[in-house]
Amino acid sequence: MKFGKQLETEAEGIPSEWRPYLIQYKALKKLITKVAEEIESRGLSTSLLHECLEEDGGLSTVNDEEDESIPKIKYYFTAATAADDDASANDKGADQHDETTLDDHEQHQQEERILIKSPAVKRQRRSSTVTLVKELLTLTLEEKDRIKDAEEKEDQETKEVQEKHEKHIKTLVVELEQDDEFFKMLMEELQQAAMLQDVTTQKFQHDISDLETRMTKVAAPTQKTDMYNWRKIFSIYMDAQIFQGNAESDRTFRSVERAKKQMTWFVEQLGKSNLLNKLKSKESKSAFEQFVALNTELITMKHYQMLNQTAMRKILKKHDKRSGLTASQSFPEIVSTDALFSPKLAKMLYSTITTKLTTIIPQPEDYACPVCMSVAWRPIRLACSHVFCVRCLIKAQKKKMDSCPLCRHPTAVRSATALNLDEGLQNFLKLYFPQEIKEKKRENEREQAIEDVQAMTGKKYTEEQLMRMSQNRSDSKCNIM
C-alpha cells in the first residue's frame, strides 16, 4: 500500500478535528512534480544534480583544494532576513577594514615621528661634515625602502580583494520558485501541527488536574468511598505498563501499537475482575470513564505525532528522489522539529498521570515491611531510617541480630526500642489500610499463639504443620450446646 493511501487509512483513527492538521502529503507530492519540471526547464536534470551533489549537505564532489576553476553546484536555503544579515555583515566588515587601514597609516606616521625624535637617532656632533652627510643619506634610503614595502603590500591586498570580487561575480544563482512553494507549504503544515500540539497539551494537563480533584473525593479513605476498588484498578493499570515498562530490565517507552495492545489488556482485566460493576457511586464511574479517555487521548497524540513525522520524512525523501536535490539533509538543519516529534512530550504527560493520579491512593507495596512483605503495622523506624513492623523487629532481636538487614547499620536493630515507633506513619496506615492492618493483627496473634504453645509443650512445629493447623482453625466452628 502506498503511503498516501496508508496515511488516509490511519487518519481515521484520530479525532476528526485533528485531521486537517496532518501534513498534506498528496498536495506536497503534486508540488514535487512541479519542482522537477522547473529544474528541467532551467537546463538541469535530476541525474546531473545527483552526480554533482553529495549526500552530506549538498557540497561538490570535487575537492576545492585541487582545482578552484572547476564549476561546482551547491544547494542551500535562503530567507528574507538572510540577505539583510549578510549585507550588514559586509558593511561592518568594510568599516572594520577601513578603520584598520587608517590605524596602520597613523601608526606608520607615529613610528616616523618616534624615529626622528628618538634618542637612538640623535647623534653627537660630528667634527667631520662628510660623516654627517653619510648619515643623512642612510636615513633617506631607509625611508624610501619602507615606503616601497608599504606600497607593495597595499598593491598585494588590492589584488587579492579584486580576485575575490571576480570570483564572486562568476557565481550563478538559480532560484527555484516551485521549490520555494513546496517548502513554504511544508513550513505552514509544521507550524499548524505545533499549534495543535500546544493547545492539546494544555487541555490534557487541565483535564488531569480536574480528574485529580475528582479522584480525591471519590477515593477518600472513608467507609462510603471506592478506595479499595480504585486501588485495585490502579494496581492493574501499573501492571499493564501501557506507555512505559516498569521492570528494571525494561524501561523503554512503548510504541503506538504496543500501547494500544496493553490498553486493551487493561480493559479486559477490569472486565474479568468485575471491578467496574463494584464501583458504588456515579462519580466514581464517571471518573473512571475520564481516566480511560485521558489514556486513549495520549495514545492518539502519540499516533498523530508518528504520522506527521513519517509523512515529513517520506515527502522529503521523495523530493530528493524526483528533483535530485538534498533537502532531506539540509531542511532539518534549518527547521528544528525536535519539539514537534520528540517522545519527551508523551513521557512528560504519562509522568503527570502516574504522579498526580496513581499516588492519590497509596499502594500497600509501598508501605510493606521488607522482611514479611506485608503492611508494616506498628512501624518501627530504625536509626538508619529504614522501617520494619514491630513483629519482625522482635524476631530479629531474639535472634541476636544487631545490624539493619538492608543497609547493614551496625547497631540499628539492637538499639531499637518502643521509642522508635513512627506514630505519624502509624496513623497514616490506619487511615488508608484498615483491611490490611486487620489481617496483620490476626497473623500476629496466630504467630504469638503458636509460640506460646511451643513454649508450653517444648515442641517445635514445622511450616507444613503450622499451615495445617491454620487450615483446621479456619474450618472449625464453635457450637454452643
Image (cartoon, grey):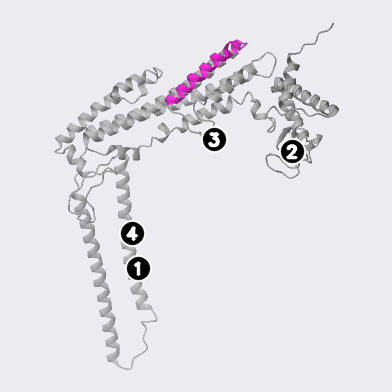
Mark 4 closeness class: few <14, some 14–19, many ≥20 residues within 10 Å: few
Which residue in the protein does label 2 denote? 382
Q: Mark 1 or mark 4: which comes first in sequence?
A: 4
Residue at 31%, 66% (x, y): give it: 105
Element carrying mark 2: loop
2 or 345: which is nearer to us? 2
392 magenta-colored: no
Residue at the extreme top of the image, as rendered: 481
Marks 3/2: CA–CA distance = 28 Å
Instruction: Return the mark for residue 248.
Output: 3
Residue bounds of the magenta highlight: 256-283
Instruction: Say whether disc 1 or disc 3 marks the residue closer to the N-terminus.
Output: 1
Are dots 2 and 1 in contact, CB under 8 Å? no
Q: Residues within 10 Å of mark 1 (few under 14, many from 20)?
A: few
x 84%, y 27%: residue: 457
Mark 3 closeness class: few <14, some 14–19, many ≥20 residues within 10 Å: few
Q: Sequence-wise, which precedes: disc 3 or disc 4?
A: 4
Callouts 2 and 4 close, C-beta under 8 Å:
no
Circle 3: residue type: Glu
Distance from disc 1 to disc 4, alpha carbons, whole Å, reads 12 Å
Quarter occupied by the C terminus: top right
Tell me, yes or no, if residue 430 can be seen here.
no
Between marks 3 and 4, how big is the CA–CA gap?
65 Å
For label 4, the residue is 99
The residue carrying mark 1 is 107
Q: Amino acid at mark 1?
A: Gln
Q: Quadrant of residue 433?
A: top right
Of tags 1 and 3, the one toward the viewer is 3
- Amino acid tagged 2: Leu
Residue 27 coordinates in the image, percent (x, y) = 27, 24
Q: Secondary structure at mark 3?
A: loop
Q: For the residue labelled by badge 1, is the local secondary structure a helix, a strand or a loop?
A: helix
